[in-house]
Amino acid sequence: MTAYTERIAATARSRTVGSRIAASLVYPLGLPTLLLVLWGLVATRGTSKFFPDPLTIAEAFRETWVGPAFVEDVLPSLARLGLGVAGSIVLGIAAGTVIGLTHWLRELLEPLLEFLRAIPPPVLIPVAMLLLGITDTMKVVVIVSGAVWPILLNTIEGVRGTDSVMKETAESFRVSWWERLWFLVLPAASPRIMAGVRQALSVALILMVISEMFASSSGLGYRIAYFQRNYLIAEMWSGILLLGLVGVFLAVAFGLVERRVLRWYHGIREVNRA
Amino acid sequence: MRVPSTRRLRALRKAVLGVVGLTGFLVVWQLIPTLGLINPSYLPYVTDVLARLFEQLVDLAFWRRLGGTMTSWAIGLTVATIGAVVLGTVVGLVPFLRRATHTMVEFLRPIPSVALIPLAVLMFGIQRQAALVIIIYASFWQVFVQVIYGVADVDAVARDTARGFGLTRREQLTHLVLPTTLPYLMTGLRLAAAVALILAITAEMVIGNPGLGRMIELSRSAGDAAGLYALVVVTGLLGLTVNIAFRFIERRVLSWHQSVRGEEPL
């Protein structure tokens, strides 16, 4: 029976292998190519000067971002983003674990955290400017103060949701507190924590851009706003494109890390589903 | 008789601790400028901020700005939700479209919506439309992705059964796809409502169309610290209200659903 199905599958595979490769290329690339071509046609025919054609944008992209601008504007922005994200992860997981494990602390802080989380993060930029001035520290603090919430709250929930049988088993086997934290509580919370980190990444990127549009004389956000104010349309589009690429890169990198960290978890879910 | 009383005791304890936590936060805030740790012109006294907050609440101009912000929020959220539900259902139900749009979605979705602010300003100037572009772009993806997941989640056996019983396409949509998608849609809507509020205020801060965001920016540039902090508290309360309202709506709409009824499936 197995051999029979395998043979059938094999012939089906060999027959369609050519069309399959074609399909795997056409499906992901077809629509973007089509849209780019359409855009190009509309832009060259049309009169709207706000939508330059893709080739002009590509040219502007090369001229604007390849070279010293990359070192002066892009790298510092990314460094602040990285610091902010790292800070939120460390702070969020550390505080979240403590709050999640301490019952009375959680009840004490719950309404307060609920309120603080509800404040739209960009509103904190003027506050941070007032307290810290227009500095790099201010921008990193702004990123942390916005991105820490999803990680913190998800960690609290994840730590709380640790399986009680496992917790009691570990206790009765006299597993030490640190070992319990490291081998039981944090792994059990990690799917929730990773979900929080995913949200935090997009918040952090938004805050990086806005803090620079708002209060800066360098950086990616500042550049894009500068191009717009000076009617450098193609350059502005190239900046939007670059931000998009940063966003996509972050999403892909996060996907890889998540798959590595949560390999065991996805494995269990596969087994449960089968 | 003992069980409900301990439960009530626990709820009371929770409420008391919560109030203690909030009060503690306010006391610490009041102490920081009082003890001179931070200059009061950068971190004003809580009492000043609260006084300013109540002053705002009786000011008609404040309510007009709040109305401006919430109007942008409501229009943006509605347009984004309708668009996302329609497109998401179509794309989710047609496998060809799902495969064809996948890369496009994965590229467009992570673009931070604020990157589009300059474009929106160029196209519409300092107007509500510019803010709407940003709000709609950001909240659209929240709903769209959830709807696609939801539509794809339709149980295969249920679908085959529906087909076997000869349900029409329309009946399948209302009796099969809609109930499966609704929990996903409500999650998307709740996320989108929060995101839309954030971007409504952000857009006003950066673009300068009238509303709470511009008021925040104005009080910052005027050096009016108490006013600034009062507005930050207002936006927090606003965010909290939106969160609670949408959680309530979610529970009402999904009152039939397992996740809300809370019965353990066996």
Image (tube, rainbow, N blue to C red):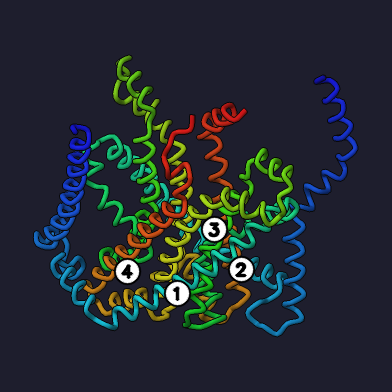
Kindly identify the residue that appears in the image at 70 percent across and 85 percent down. Answer: A47
Parent chain of label 4: A
Q: CA distance from mark 1 to mark 4?
A: 22 Å
Placement of the N terminus of chain A among the 4 image quadrants: top right
How far separated are the C-alphas under marks 1 and 3? 18 Å
- Residue holding disc 3: B143
Q: Residue at x 19, y 73 (%)?
A: B54
The amino acid sitting under disc 3 is Val
Mark 4 = which residue? A126
Q: Secondary structure at mark 2?
A: helix
Mark 3 neighbour class, 10 Å CA radius: few under 14, some 14 to 19, many 20 or more? many
- The answer to whether residue B103 of the structure is visible from this angle is no
Labels 2 and 3 share a subunit:
no
Cα separation, mark 2 vs mark 4, equals 28 Å
Spot occupied by residue B75 in the image (x, y as percentages of width and height)? 49, 73
**Quadrant the C terminus of chain A occupies:** top right
- Against A171, residue B244 (above or below) is below
Q: Residue furthest bottom?
A: A47
Q: Identify residue type, mark 2.
A: Ser
Q: As rendered, which of B159 and A35 lies closer to the eye? A: B159
The residue that label 1 is drawn on is B72
Position of residue A24 in the picture relative to residue B251 (left or right): right
- Determine which of the numbered discs, if any, sits on residue A238 in the image: 2
Seen from the viewer's position, the closer of residues A184 and A59 is A184
Question: In this view of the protein, can residue B218 be seen by the observer?
Answer: yes
| Chain of the residue displaying label 3 | B
